[in-house]
Amino acid sequence: MFGLDSQKRQYTPVAPPKPRQIAIEVLILSQKKQIPVERILGDSLTEAQLNSIDSNLCRELVSGCVRWRRLLDWIINRLTNNRTQKPIIQEILRLGIYQVFFLSRIPEHAIVNESVILAKTNKHTAQSGFINAITRRLLKEKETISKIISKLKTEQPALGYSHPNWLFEKWAQQWGHEKAVSLLKWNNKPAPTYARLNLLNKKAEIILKLWESEKVEIIPVDFDWTKKGTIFQLLKHPKIESLQSFNDGLFYIQDPSTLLSVSFLNLQSGQKILDLCAAPGGKTCLIADHINNQGEITSTDINEVRLKLLQENCKRLKITCVKTGLTENLLNDNKKFDRVLVDAPCTNSGVIRRRLDLRWRKTFEEKKQLTKIQLQLLEKAAKHTEQNGIIVYSTCSIDPEENELIVKRFLRKNEDWKLETERMLHPVEDQTDGAYSAKLIKKQPC
């Protein structure tokens, strides 16, 4: 309906002002502090302790307003004749417009009333009449605007699907128009939650019964690079941290795409493995699983706070073969490993669906800086790899400049290494987050 039906989700009309107020506060704070909105939202919901209905509504409002910001602002400009608003008034208008076009079963009069209440609650009573008038005008022009949006999606996809022009143009040049549009659509869908079983914990065998008792609804999912029967999509669940099965270390929240790089390592028990850029530890924990907790994993990072998360995850999953620390403290010139994983920092262009405001924060300058770091990390990995060892280079980017082109630059400078295999996961084609992995081995002397 109105060209937007693929994005609509059902909600019961049980929404008092509180979830909307929290949504406004989160949106304003994320703009002021330039902190990823997911982090602010998570902290705010933890503090607010809303019931599940209000919590879900708040998440939906924040996610929707961030993802669809460009299109929502286009609608606001149309309704206000390009008038400039204070940030909080802009957010209140975005919130109202998002509800009108994307949420079902919220009465139109409630959207108007709640928008006015938000203005008054946030000490902008003088603007409440303006918000009332604009929201009512929106409802009158809803059908006309919906038809225009449908046309925009065909004629100006970046605007119609709310992405920066430069990003769409880059993808269209890279993959063609149709494939680029499919990626825009993908990025606007909610990201599923996946759980990977911790096979080091024998209780994992009974996890399906435990999940049933904990009211966790799941479906098993398999990919050609994952072990059958170990990945599940969580359809419905209480708060993850409240689950006994989680606290007992029976599973780890992890997107299937992150398992590809570890599958390239050819792991065996007893090996010495280096995980560079390891925090918060998803791949480290999977490596421990593959070697049955028997070997030596050195997991390093440059961020002490994130290293603490890695340590906590290892403790929860009862992993004992991991040594963690800052990269500069753990690596000396003579230390060598059988396997080295370089999970390099990147622009995260393969996980825009999961990182809500990432599309608005990505820049060309950022990519230039990151490619230097990526190449440096590969060079460091080579210095710490045994003669018969393997390096796996991985990112959650779908940009060639951060993936195959980095590998080619490394190989041009290091002729004693060769590429054995590489693979990029495309979000739409592979139905998972985007990712890239390359397996590098040393050339053997003739």
Image: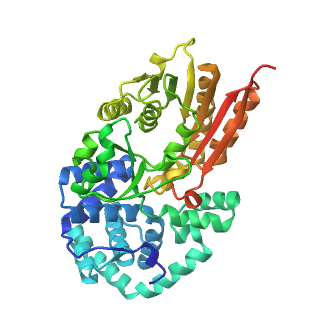
Is the residue 20 above or below the residue 108 in the image? above
Residue 399 higher or lower than 8, as above or below: above
- Residue 128 sits in which quadrant? bottom left
In this view, 420 is above or below 443: below
Could you tell me residue 435's position as x and y percent? 56, 47
Q: Quadrant of the C terminus?
A: top right
Depth check: 409 or 431 in front? Answer: 431
Q: In this rendered view, identify the residue nearer to me: 14 or 433.
A: 433
User: Residue 68 falls in which quadrant of the image?
Assistant: bottom left
Locate residue 305 relative to residue 126 in the image: left or right. right
Q: Residue at position x 55%, y 57% from top?
A: 427
| Quadrant (top left/top right/bottom left/bottom right) for the N terminus | bottom left
Q: Residue furthest right?
A: 446
Side of 48 where 152 appears, left or right = right
- The residue at the point 32 percent across, 73 percent down is 96
Could you say where residue 73 lies in the image, as x and y percent from the top left? 44, 69
Residue 336 appears left or right of 251: right
Give the answer, above or below, for where 442 lies relative to 395. Answer: above
The percent coordinates of residue 338 (x first, y second) are: 57, 22
* Residue drawn at (53%, 37%) of the image: 262
